[in-house]
Amino acid sequence: MSELLKFEYYRIFKSKIIWVMAAICAAAPVLAALALNLIIKELAGEDVNFDLTSSNEKYFTWFIISYFYERVPLILALFVPLFIGRDYKDGVIRNKLIAGHTRFEIFTSYVVTQVSVAVVLSAIYIFAGCIGMAFTRVGLNLNHGEMFLRAGTLLLALIATTTLFAVISLLIKSRAGTTVLCIAFIFTLGIFSMLSTNFSYNHKMIDEYREIYEENISNLQFDYGPNSMYYYQPKEFDESDYFNVGWYIGHPIFLLTDASLSDEFVPDLQSLVLSANDELFSYPKKIARTAFVDSIYAAFVGNGGYITADDLEKIDGAYVKVADAELQYNIKSIIWLAIYFGGGYALFRKKNIF
């Protein structure tokens, strides 16, 4: 096994493309930090006393470094299948078997080395992001290192994804086919993320929402008659608006996979959602089940109603502590990592390599 690992690490180290990938991972967060710095300066204008809060600093630091989870997987979706696929074409895997190495050793050596690439590239991205933020007007604030724990949750999910890429590449000889599959997985994951978070609520949450909905609607006061442009008839609560085909697909994805991790952990400057914290761009201690919160908000706005963050806090599950979400995602990532590795090896040991 050690010989195989040394051989694979040597080949990776000698590959020019790996150095290009490392350079991209180093440059991307630094450029993003510089761009953020320009935006902050533009917003501040000539106000030399313009200051961000500690929570703002943490938010923007996390915004920069967490995007390794969005950028590195796409790089790996290209690198892993092309790197392993070449070994099928050149007969390297066949020669390893002839040399006396077991299929388990061969399979494990590929998975371990490719996972190592994912970890190193992610570490480069995070470190470069920290350096970039340290030289911005915002400054670097890692929340006493707690931010690395959040990054660890993302990294564990990325390790599971990289394992899947390696498994696919070992099971399918076509480099073009495996590359297409891995890239398709990345883009499909974005769809699954949106779908799962859109239907992250359960029956108990909807029951609690119904109570708030009906109470708020009954308390509304109207001063305008039927001829007024402000007149409306509040819509009666309809459970089918929430439990439909989308829910029966999206909710199991939310419960069984970590597809929603990106939407819940990686911040997006373009989408502002209701938060338990009134401060804009705050580093959250809780995660809003964003789509559920937004759907409630949209329902009330659409009916002329009103709902506050305090109302949402009453709904058990509308907000979860980050630490609790980390634990949930870590468990799911480990389970899927085991499934990918175990299932992949079971198929690889039966595969005709000659």
Image (cartoon, helix red, strand yellow):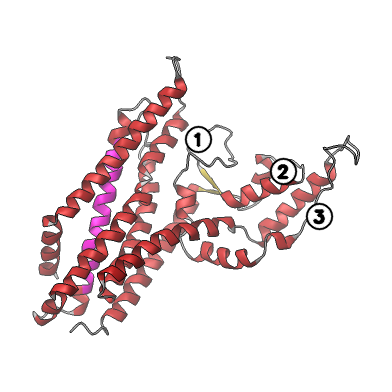
Give the foreground label among 1 and 3. Answer: 3
Pick the quarter of the image with the C terminus: bottom left
Precedes in sequence: disc 1 or disc 2? 1
Pick the quarter of the image with the N terminus: bottom left
Precedes in sequence: disc 2 or disc 3? 3
Q: Residue at x 62, y 48 (%)?
A: 293
Decide which of 142, 352 is in the foreground and name it: 352
Question: What residue type is disc 1 on?
Answer: Ser
CB-based contact (under 8 Å), mark 2 and mark 3: no
- Crowding at label 1, few (<14), some or many (≥20) Cα neighbours within 10 Å? some
Q: Main secondary structure of the magenta part?
A: helix
Precedes in sequence: disc 1 or disc 3? 3
Q: Residue at x 45, y 56 (%)?
A: 327
Q: Is residue 116 magenta?
A: yes
In percent of width and height, residue 205 lies at 66, 56
Q: Is residue 229 visible?
A: yes
Asked which secondary structure carries label 1, the reply is: loop
User: Label 2, on which residue?
Assistant: 301
**Marks 1 and 2, Cα distance to the nearest angstrom?**
24 Å
Question: What residue type is disc 2 on?
Answer: Val
Give the foreground label among 1 and 2. Answer: 2
User: Label 3, on which residue?
Assistant: 236
Q: Residue at x 32, y 59 (%)?
A: 159
Asked which secondary structure carries label 2, the reply is: helix
Q: Residue at x 57, y 36 (%)?
A: 277
Asked which secondary structure carries label 3, the reply is: loop
Q: Please state if 53 lies on the left or on the right of 345 as rendered.
A: right
